[in-house]
Amino acid sequence: MPVVPARLRAPLAAAGVPVLACVLALCGLGTWTAIGRAGSPPHVAVTEAYVYQPLGSTPETAAFFTVTNDGGSADRLVEITSPGTAVPPALSEHRMTSFGSAYRQPVDSATVPAGDGLTMDPHGIDVTVRPKGTWRPGDEVSFTLRFAHGKPLEVRAVVVRPGTRTDRPLSP
């Protein structure tokens, strides 16, 4: 093994760490490219869709979607429309005040990460809707989800009682 003079050890060690980091990054990127994921577009799908039945005189309720993305890059849900609502549906996020009360804050979009997805729920991202007419459990409501990069998806959400989810297969 060659002996490195003492005056060169510190500079070599200082240069070695960034060089090693670059080599590891290049190996990771090479692997990602070799398995075909580098630069692949988002590929989104909706696997679950349900909407809460409105209660009492409350004019608004919430819809929830599970959006998967098995593509190689993230996408963003940017708009949701529905012919079954009195006003356009709005993406919102559940927030809590310092006093423990809840409110909805509108959001412009929701990220659908690559190789993962977005699962909406009452404690995070959801869709605020105002029904046109009366919705009862078992009814289906049509929605169109639009993404920044992917094609729009047409889905039918089943109406369920608040606090429950649907286990029915998603209707096209």
Image (cartoon, rainbow, N blue to C red):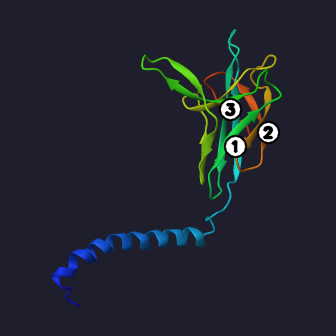
Q: Tag 2, which secondary structure? A: loop
Mark 2 crowd level (few <14, some 14–19, many ≥20, 10 Å Cα): some
> Foreground: 65 or 101?
101
Q: Which residue is mark 3?
A: 166
Q: Which residue is mark 2?
A: 171
Taking 64 as reference, is 37 above or below it? below
Determine the image quadrant of residue 13. Answer: bottom left
Give the CA distance from mark 1 to mark 3.
Answer: 11 Å
Q: Earlier in the sequence, mark 2 or mark 1?
A: 1
Residue 97 image position (x, y, % from top left): 46, 20
Q: Earlier in the sequence, mark 3 or mark 2?
A: 3
Residue farthest to the left?
Answer: 6
Q: Which residue is mark 1?
A: 47
Q: Amino acid at mark 1?
A: Thr
Give the CA distance from mark 3 to mark 2.
Answer: 12 Å
Q: Amino acid at mark 3?
A: Thr
